[in-house]
Each structure stands twice: as C-alpha cells, then as structure tokens.
Image: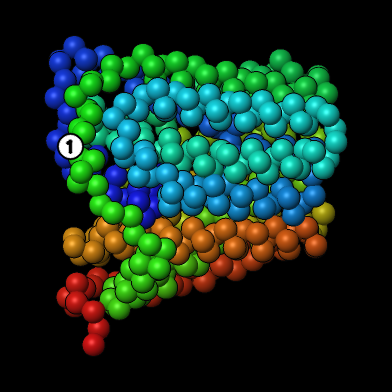
C-alpha cells in the first residue's frame, strides 16, 4: 500500500494497535466478505489497469504520445496531493466502509466518463478527459489505500490479512485472465472501440460489485475513537517537511539506500512504457488489449510465490535479478523493434509479463531491505523521506520520457529504462551490503 508523509502515521496506528474488539460472529463474517471484496477489486483493477489498459487505449484513440505517456505523471500527482492534504481527514473518519465503497464507484464512473469521451471521437476532448480521469483515479486510489489500511488493521488479524493478500493476487489474477479471454472470444469480430468498451464495461461492473461487497461487511461503531482527535499531531509546514527529508541525508545508511533507490525509479516505469510500445504496434489488433491484460495478470500471479522464495535467501539477489530481467527484456524488445520484426503481439505480451514479474519482485525486496537496515526510531521518518523523493522524481522522469516518446519514439524511452536498469543492477550490488556501523548516528 502506498503511504506518504501523513499516511505513515495512519499506517503506524493501524498496524501497531491491537485489533478492535468485535463479536466472534462479526469477525468470522468479515474475513470471507473482505477476502471476496479484495478479489473482485483486483479483477476490476486488472481489467481497467491505469498502468497497462488505459495507456493502451489512449494510444488506440490516437491521443498524442506525450499525453499517453504523461498520464503516469498525472496519476502520481493526484496520489501526492492525497498524501499531503487528505490523509489527516482519512485518519479522522471513524467509519470507513461507506467511503471505501464510494471510492470504488467513483473509479468506475471515471472509466465510464473516459469511454464516453472516446465515443465522441474528438481527440482534444478525449485528451482532456483522460488527463482528468487519471488525476481523479490517483487522488481517489490513494485515499482508498489509506482507509483500507486502517480498516484492515481494525478488523482482521495479521494472519488473516496475509492470507487475504495471497488470495487477492491469486484469485483475482486467475479471474481476470479468464474474463479477459472470455470477453475476447465474444467480441473478437467486433470493431476495436466495441471490444475495448466491453472490456472497460466489465471492469466497471466489478468496481461496482466490489463496492457493494464492502458495504456487506460489519464495521463496529467501537472503531470510532473520538478521544484520538485531541491527540492528533499538528500538521507540519511544507518547510518543516522538506527539512525533515534533508536531515535524513546526515545518516550514511540512508545515503547508501538512496544511491541504490534512485535508479530504480526508472525501472519501475518499465511497465507503463512497455505497454505504450506494445500499444504503438498493436492498438488496432483484435488480440492486443487482451494479450496485455493476460500477460500483466499472469505476471502478478507468478511473482508472489516466485519472489517470496528468493527473498528468503537474499534481497540483493531479487533486486539484481529483477533489474537484469528488465534490461534483458527491453534489449530484446528494442532489437526486434529496430529490425522491424516486432509485429507479433505475443512478443510484447511476453515482455510485459517479464517486466511485471521483475518490478513486483523489486518493489517487495526494496521494502524488506529498508526494514532490515533502518533503525527503529528512524523507520517512519525514513520511509516518508524515501516516498516523497522517489514519487516526485517519478513524476518528473515519466513526464520527461513521455516528451521523448512524443518527439521521437517510445523505443528511446525504453532504451533509457534499459540503461537505468543496468546502472541499478550495479548500484544494488555495490550499495546493498550489511551495515556494520551504528546506523542511528549521523556522520560527523
């Protein structure tokens, strides 16, 4: 789950405090309800993925490549605004299930709005609506994540949360693959817009169903703790936040981590930009969108058990292998592209599958590695600093890569990601070493 400066305190409260007492019947009922809701939500997000599906559709609707690539930046800006300005309001809400259900409906409405704009065929209107939709999705998704973190901390035990996460990825991935293939078989003879709108329509239906399932859970009134309002920490100013971030660089362990972490910003952008180069080649293909959905869903399905095993051996191994996977896949894709033999949709589907597996493993390993090296008293502040720096960097970098893709071609943006992946592999090898010094003390 994505947390920022204010969101970290909410996450800390939700995970550190004991689970809210509730009746055994309510607890037993909430586990299957929330598990089912998480699986349905996973299906909805996979079929209407802002990282894969919507950029693919943006290209197929003939939006300028800069707009299609910059949609990633727009979504991140929405998430950053939620982190800075809305997390306190989220923490103050005592009852969250209705608000979470509402966010699912809002995301579904955003997808409907995007397809309605696409139906007009007016490119400037489609561009404006897509940018607005991505901003709202980023804003709402971040709020939903913060509320859901708190809700799960109140109503599910740690073991139940872990089981739910695995079922969400496994069950949701399998259902998404099956539905994507079914929709493809039903609509393969239809025009492109009909095929795409049907897929998005199924995603919207699952978002609505997910919201209804959320309303079915039992949320105790006891979760409301008005007394906590008096204990709420005053909001830090923007200047104080910046000073807090800069102060972290006094610690050698943090500097080493950031040297390793910064090249990974480019690596994590591989999924949307690999989806863009696939869209550029196959947006008119009857199999293009289905292949992208199936490959990304399969990537999430495989990455869980695969990286869990390797992570137990070495976080550095996961990150080095993951970055090399992105670099190798991108290099093969570029070679096929410049040779003019990248017309097979299966090539791009395999590439997207590999980078999805790689990026998922890298994301998991870097979080676990940070927990290993960060002193307990600096963990929250350090996490917030890393989050702020990397998210801002990702916004700027994705916008720059979108401009490169627009002025030249997407392949050059992919080439940059390949180079950054190789640099990242080296920095992971050099920087991810056991910390022998007292990392809690700043360097003199």
Toward which corner of the image does residue 95 lie, by quadrant?
top left
- Dividing the image into 4 quarters, which one contains the N terminus? top left
Residue lying furthest bottom in this view?
444
Q: Dot 1 corresponds to which residue? A: 227
Q: Measured from the top left, where is residue 243 in percent x and y?
A: 36, 71
Foreground residue, 288 or 333?
Answer: 288
Q: Quadrant of residue 377?
A: bottom left
Q: Is residue 23 visible?
A: yes
> Which residue is at a point 57% across and 58% down the rendered structure image?
395
In the image, what residue occupies the spot 61% across and 50% down? 74
Determine the residue positioned at 77% across, 51% down.
65
- In the picture as drawn, the residue positioned furthest to the top comes out as 25
Vertical placement of residue 39 versus 419, above or below = above
Question: Which residue is at the front of the view, 190 or 258?
Answer: 258
106 over 444 or under it: above or below = above
Residue 321 placement: quadrant: bottom left
- Residue 302 in view in this figure: no
- In this figure, what is the number of numbered marks? 1
- Judge by depth and name the residue closer to the eye, 201 or 121: 121
Which coloring applies here? rainbow
| Residue 84 x, y percent position in the rendering | 43, 52
Please, is residue 31 above or below residue 121 in the view? above
Q: Secondary structure at mark 1?
A: helix
Q: Residues within 10 Å of mark 1 (few under 14, many from 20)?
A: few
Camera-side residue of 333 and 247? 247
Percent from the top left, x then y, of residue 286? 77, 29
On-image quarter of the C terminus: bottom left
Q: Position of residue 297 (x, y in %)?
A: 53, 34
Q: Residue at x 39, y 17 (%)?
A: 215
Residue lying furthest front: 230
């Amino acid at each position: 789950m994505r947390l920022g400066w204010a969101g970290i305190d909410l996450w800390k409260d939700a995970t550190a405090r004991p689970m809210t007492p509730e009746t055994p019947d309510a607890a037993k009922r909430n586990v299957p309800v929330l598990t089912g809701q998480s699986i349905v939500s996973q299906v909805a997000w996979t079929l209407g993925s802002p990282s894969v599906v919507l950029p693919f559709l943006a290209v197929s609707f003939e939006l300028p490549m800069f707009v299609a690539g910059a949609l990633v930046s727009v979504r991140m800006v929405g998430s950053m605004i939620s982190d800075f300005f809305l997390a306190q309001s989220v923490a103050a809400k005592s009852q969250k299930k209705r608000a979470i259900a509402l966010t699912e409906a809002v995301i579904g409405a955003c997808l409907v709005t995007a397809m309605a704009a696409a139906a007009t065929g007016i490119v400037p209107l489609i561009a404006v609506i897509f940018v607005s939709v991505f901003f709202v999705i980023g804003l709402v998704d971040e709020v939903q994540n913060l509320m859901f973190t708190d809700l799960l901390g109140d109503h599910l035990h740690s073991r139940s949360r872990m089981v739910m996460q695995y079922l969400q990825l496994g069950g949701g991935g399998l259902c998404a693959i099956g539905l994507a293939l079914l929709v493809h078989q039903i609509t393969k003879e239809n025009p492109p817009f009909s095929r795409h709108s049907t897929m998005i329509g199924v995603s919207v239906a699952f978002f609505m169903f997910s919201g209804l399932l959320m309303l079915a859970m039992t949320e105790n009134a006891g979760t409301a703790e008005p007394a906590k309002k008096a204990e709420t920490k005053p909001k830090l100013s923007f200047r104080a936040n910046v000073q807090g971030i800069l102060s972290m660089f006094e610690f050698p362990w943090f500097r080493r981590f950031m040297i390793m972490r910064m090249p990974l910003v480019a690596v994590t952008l591989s999924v949307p930009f690999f989806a863009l180069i696939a869209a550029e080649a196959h947006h008119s293909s009857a199999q293009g969108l289905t292949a992208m959905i199936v490959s990304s869903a399969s990537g999430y399905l495989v990455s869980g058990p695969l990286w869990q095993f390797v992570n137990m051996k070495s976080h550095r191994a996961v990150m080095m292998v993951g970055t090399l996977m992105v670099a190798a896949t991108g290099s093969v894709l570029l070679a096929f592209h410049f040779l003019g033999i990248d017309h097979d949709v299966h090539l791009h589907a395999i590439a997207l599958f590999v980078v999805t597996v790689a990026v998922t493993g890298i994301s998991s390993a870097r979080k676990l590695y940070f927990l290993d090296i960060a002193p307990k008293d600096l963990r929250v502040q350090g996490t917030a600093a890393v989050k702020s720096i990397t998210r801002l960097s990702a916004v700027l970098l994705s916008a720059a890569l979108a401009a490169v893709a627009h002025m030249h071609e997407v392949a050059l943006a992919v080439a940059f990601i390949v180079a950054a992946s190789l640099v990242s592999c080296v920095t992971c090898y050099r920087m991810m070493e056991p910390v022998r010094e007292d990392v809690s003390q700043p360097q003199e």
